[in-house]
Protein backbone atom coordinates (compact mmCIF):
# COMPACT_ATOMS: atom_id res chain seq x y z
CA UNK A 1 0.00 0.00 0.00
CA UNK A 2 1.17 3.53 -0.75
CA UNK A 3 2.46 5.38 2.32
CA UNK A 4 0.71 8.47 3.59
CA UNK A 5 2.64 11.67 2.84
CA UNK A 6 2.70 15.08 4.54
CA UNK A 7 4.36 18.28 3.36
CA UNK A 8 6.04 20.60 5.88
CA UNK A 9 7.45 23.96 4.83
CA UNK A 10 9.37 26.70 6.51
CA UNK A 11 7.98 30.19 5.81
CA UNK A 12 10.66 32.91 5.94
CA UNK A 13 13.11 32.63 3.05
CA UNK A 14 11.33 29.55 1.72
CA UNK A 15 7.86 30.80 0.78
CA UNK A 16 9.14 34.38 0.86
CA UNK A 17 12.35 35.66 -0.69
CA UNK A 18 14.11 36.32 2.59
CA UNK A 19 13.39 36.54 6.33
CA UNK A 20 10.84 39.05 7.59
CA UNK A 21 13.54 39.92 10.09
CA UNK A 22 15.97 40.78 7.26
CA UNK A 23 13.45 42.98 5.45
CA UNK A 24 12.48 44.66 8.74
CA UNK A 25 16.14 45.27 9.57
CA UNK A 26 16.56 47.07 6.27
CA UNK A 27 13.38 49.10 6.63
CA UNK A 28 13.14 49.87 10.33
CA UNK A 29 16.22 48.95 12.37
CA UNK A 30 19.42 50.84 12.98
CA UNK A 31 22.56 49.42 14.59
CA UNK A 32 21.23 50.10 18.07
CA UNK A 33 17.93 48.33 17.56
CA UNK A 34 19.80 45.27 16.29
CA UNK A 35 21.30 44.79 19.77
CA UNK A 36 18.92 41.92 20.74
CA UNK A 37 20.04 40.01 17.66
CA UNK A 38 23.69 40.41 18.64
CA UNK A 39 22.84 39.17 22.14
CA UNK A 40 21.17 36.11 20.60
CA UNK A 41 24.26 35.49 18.46
CA UNK A 42 26.40 35.60 21.60
CA UNK A 43 24.12 33.04 23.25
CA UNK A 44 22.84 35.46 25.89
CA UNK A 45 19.15 35.35 24.99
CA UNK A 46 16.94 32.92 23.09
CA UNK A 47 15.94 33.21 19.44
CA UNK A 48 12.36 33.89 20.54
CA UNK A 49 13.42 36.61 22.97
CA UNK A 50 15.60 38.27 20.32
CA UNK A 51 12.82 38.34 17.73
CA UNK A 52 10.29 39.48 20.32
CA UNK A 53 12.48 42.40 21.31
CA UNK A 54 13.35 43.31 17.72
CA UNK A 55 9.83 43.12 16.36
CA UNK A 56 8.41 45.19 19.23
CA UNK A 57 10.61 48.04 17.99
CA UNK A 58 8.61 48.36 14.77
CA UNK A 59 6.47 51.39 15.61
CA UNK A 60 4.97 52.80 12.44
CA UNK A 61 1.40 53.60 11.38
CA UNK A 62 -0.46 50.50 10.21
CA UNK A 63 -0.61 51.75 6.63
CA UNK A 64 3.15 52.02 6.55
CA UNK A 65 3.60 48.52 7.94
CA UNK A 66 1.17 47.14 5.36
CA UNK A 67 2.99 48.95 2.55
CA UNK A 68 6.21 47.41 3.84
CA UNK A 69 4.73 43.89 3.94
CA UNK A 70 3.22 44.33 0.46
CA UNK A 71 6.75 44.55 -0.91
CA UNK A 72 7.88 41.21 0.55
CA UNK A 73 8.16 38.79 -2.36
CA UNK A 74 5.97 35.70 -1.93
CA UNK A 75 6.46 32.63 -4.12
CA UNK A 76 3.08 32.14 -5.82
CA UNK A 77 4.12 28.52 -6.33
CA UNK A 78 3.31 27.80 -2.69
CA UNK A 79 -0.41 28.25 -3.42
CA UNK A 80 -0.02 25.72 -6.24
CA UNK A 81 1.74 23.33 -3.86
CA UNK A 82 -1.10 23.69 -1.36
CA UNK A 83 -3.63 23.05 -4.12
CA UNK A 84 -1.83 19.94 -5.39
CA UNK A 85 -1.58 18.60 -1.83
CA UNK A 86 -5.24 19.30 -1.21
CA UNK A 87 -6.19 17.29 -4.30
CA UNK A 88 -3.99 14.41 -3.17
CA UNK A 89 -5.04 14.49 0.48
CA UNK A 90 -1.54 15.43 1.59
CA UNK A 91 -1.67 17.52 4.79
CA UNK A 92 0.37 20.73 4.56
CA UNK A 93 2.09 22.41 7.51
CA UNK A 94 3.88 25.73 7.62
CA UNK A 95 6.26 25.90 10.56
CA UNK A 96 7.86 29.16 11.55
CA UNK A 97 9.82 30.53 14.48
CA UNK A 98 8.53 33.94 13.36
CA UNK A 99 4.87 34.76 13.92
CA UNK A 100 1.42 34.46 12.41
CA UNK A 101 0.87 38.21 12.07
CA UNK A 102 2.84 38.67 8.87
CA UNK A 103 2.33 35.11 7.62
CA UNK A 104 -1.45 35.56 7.67
CA UNK A 105 -1.12 39.00 6.13
CA UNK A 106 0.93 37.59 3.24
CA UNK A 107 -0.72 34.22 2.58
CA UNK A 108 -3.68 33.96 4.97
CA UNK A 109 -5.99 33.48 1.99
CA UNK A 110 -3.99 30.45 0.79
CA UNK A 111 -3.81 28.99 4.29
CA UNK A 112 -7.57 29.22 4.62
CA UNK A 113 -8.47 28.11 1.11
CA UNK A 114 -6.38 24.93 1.20
CA UNK A 115 -6.68 24.18 4.92
CA UNK A 116 -2.97 24.56 5.66
CA UNK A 117 -1.91 24.06 9.30
CA UNK A 118 0.09 27.02 10.51
CA UNK A 119 2.38 26.23 13.43
CA UNK A 120 4.03 29.39 14.73
CA UNK A 121 4.05 32.01 17.45
CA UNK A 122 1.21 34.46 17.81
CA UNK A 123 1.81 38.07 16.89
CA UNK A 124 -0.26 41.21 17.07
CA UNK A 125 0.47 44.74 15.99
CA UNK A 126 -0.27 48.22 17.22
CA UNK A 127 1.72 51.34 16.37
CA UNK A 128 2.05 51.99 20.14
CA UNK A 129 3.48 48.65 21.25
CA UNK A 130 4.92 47.40 17.97
CA UNK A 131 4.72 43.85 16.66
CA UNK A 132 4.42 41.78 19.82
CA UNK A 133 4.98 38.04 19.80
CA UNK A 134 3.81 35.46 22.28
CA UNK A 135 4.76 31.81 22.50
CA UNK A 136 2.30 28.99 22.16
CA UNK A 137 1.27 27.49 25.51
CA UNK A 138 3.94 25.23 27.00
CA UNK A 139 1.65 22.20 26.71
CA UNK A 140 1.15 22.62 22.95
CA UNK A 141 2.49 19.63 20.99
CA UNK A 142 5.34 21.45 19.23
CA UNK A 143 6.43 23.78 22.02
CA UNK A 144 10.09 24.76 22.22
CA UNK A 145 11.16 27.28 24.89
CA UNK A 146 13.95 28.73 22.73
CA UNK A 147 12.01 29.37 19.52
CA UNK A 148 8.37 28.94 20.52
CA UNK A 149 7.85 26.05 18.13
CA UNK A 150 9.95 23.04 17.22
CA UNK A 151 10.02 22.23 13.53
CA UNK A 152 11.59 18.84 14.23
CA UNK A 153 8.73 18.01 16.61
CA UNK A 154 6.24 18.46 13.76
CA UNK A 155 8.20 16.08 11.53
CA UNK A 156 8.57 13.55 14.36
CA UNK A 157 4.90 13.64 15.21
CA UNK A 158 3.93 13.11 11.57
CA UNK A 159 6.27 10.12 11.47
CA UNK A 160 4.57 8.67 14.54
CA UNK A 161 1.25 9.08 12.77
CA UNK A 162 2.61 7.04 9.87
CA UNK A 163 3.41 9.78 7.37
CA UNK A 164 6.40 10.12 5.10
CA UNK A 165 7.46 13.74 5.39
CA UNK A 166 8.57 16.09 2.63
CA UNK A 167 10.33 19.15 4.07
CA UNK A 168 11.24 22.46 2.44
CA UNK A 169 13.46 25.06 4.08
CA UNK A 170 16.32 27.49 3.67
CA UNK A 171 18.09 28.02 6.99
CA UNK A 172 20.03 26.38 9.80
CA UNK A 173 16.97 26.39 12.11
CA UNK A 174 15.46 23.93 9.61
CA UNK A 175 18.29 21.45 9.90
CA UNK A 176 16.97 19.19 12.67
CA UNK A 177 13.60 18.94 10.96
CA UNK A 178 15.22 18.31 7.57
CA UNK A 179 17.52 15.66 9.03
CA UNK A 180 14.48 13.75 10.27
CA UNK A 181 12.39 14.22 7.11
CA UNK A 182 12.21 11.69 4.26
CA UNK A 183 12.52 14.03 1.28
CA UNK A 184 14.22 17.41 1.68
CA UNK A 185 14.11 20.45 -0.57
CA UNK A 186 16.69 22.98 0.55
CA UNK A 187 18.35 26.20 -0.45
CA UNK A 188 20.95 28.57 1.03
CA UNK A 189 22.38 27.65 4.47
CA UNK A 190 20.20 24.58 4.81
CA UNK A 191 21.42 23.22 1.48
CA UNK A 192 25.05 23.77 2.44
CA UNK A 193 24.58 22.21 5.87
CA UNK A 194 22.72 19.15 4.51
CA UNK A 195 25.39 18.59 1.88
CA UNK A 196 28.17 18.90 4.47
CA UNK A 197 26.37 16.33 6.58
CA UNK A 198 26.02 14.00 3.60
CA UNK A 199 22.21 14.09 3.61
CA UNK A 200 20.36 13.31 0.39
CA UNK A 201 18.83 16.66 -0.47
CA UNK A 202 17.25 18.33 -3.47
CA UNK A 203 18.04 21.95 -4.15
CA UNK A 204 15.29 24.37 -5.09
CA UNK A 205 15.16 28.01 -6.15
CA UNK A 206 11.40 28.29 -6.16
CA UNK A 207 8.37 26.06 -5.68
CA UNK A 208 8.41 24.98 -9.34
CA UNK A 209 10.71 22.05 -8.61
CA UNK A 210 8.79 21.11 -5.44
CA UNK A 211 5.48 21.18 -7.30
CA UNK A 212 6.84 18.99 -10.09
CA UNK A 213 7.71 16.44 -7.39
CA UNK A 214 4.35 16.72 -5.61
CA UNK A 215 2.48 16.21 -8.89
CA UNK A 216 4.21 12.88 -9.44
CA UNK A 217 3.20 11.45 -6.05
MG1 LIG B 1 13.66 30.19 6.73
Image: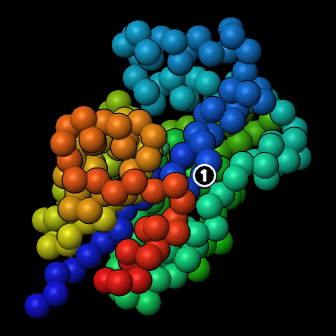
Q: Is residue 99 visible?
A: no
Establish if 72 lies above or below 112: above
* Quadrant of the image occupied by residue 46: top left
Figure colour scheme: rainbow
Taking the image as shown, residue 197 lies to the left or right of residue 23, namely: left
Residue nearer the viewer, 113 or 78: 78
Q: For numbered disc 1, what is the local secondary structure?
A: loop
Taking the image as shown, residue 29 lies to the left or right of residue 138, namely: right
Residue nearer the viewer, 131 or 163: 163
Residue where numbered disc 1 is placed: 16
Q: Is mark 1 within 8 Å of ligand 1?
A: no
Q: Position of residue 140 (x, y in %)?
A: 31, 52
Quadrant (top left/top right/bottom left/bottom right) for the N terminus = bottom left
* Quadrant of the image occupied by residue 18: top right
The residue shown at (60%, 52%) is 16
Q: Position of residue 133 (x, y in %)?
A: 56, 38
The residue shown at (44%, 17%) is 40
Q: Is residue 167 visible?
A: yes
Taking the image as shown, residue 129 lies to the left or right of residue 200, namely: right
Q: Residues within 10 Å of mark 1 (few under 14, many from 20)?
A: some
Residue nearer the viewer, 36 or 217: 217
Q: Position of residue 111 (x, y in %)?
A: 55, 70
Amino acid sequence: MKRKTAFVSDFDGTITGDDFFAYASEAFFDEKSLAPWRRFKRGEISHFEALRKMFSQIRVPLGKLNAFMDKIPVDAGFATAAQICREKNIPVYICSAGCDYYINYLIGNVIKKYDVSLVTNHGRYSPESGLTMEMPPADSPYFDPLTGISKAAIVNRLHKEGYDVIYAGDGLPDYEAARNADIVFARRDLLTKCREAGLAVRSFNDFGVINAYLKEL
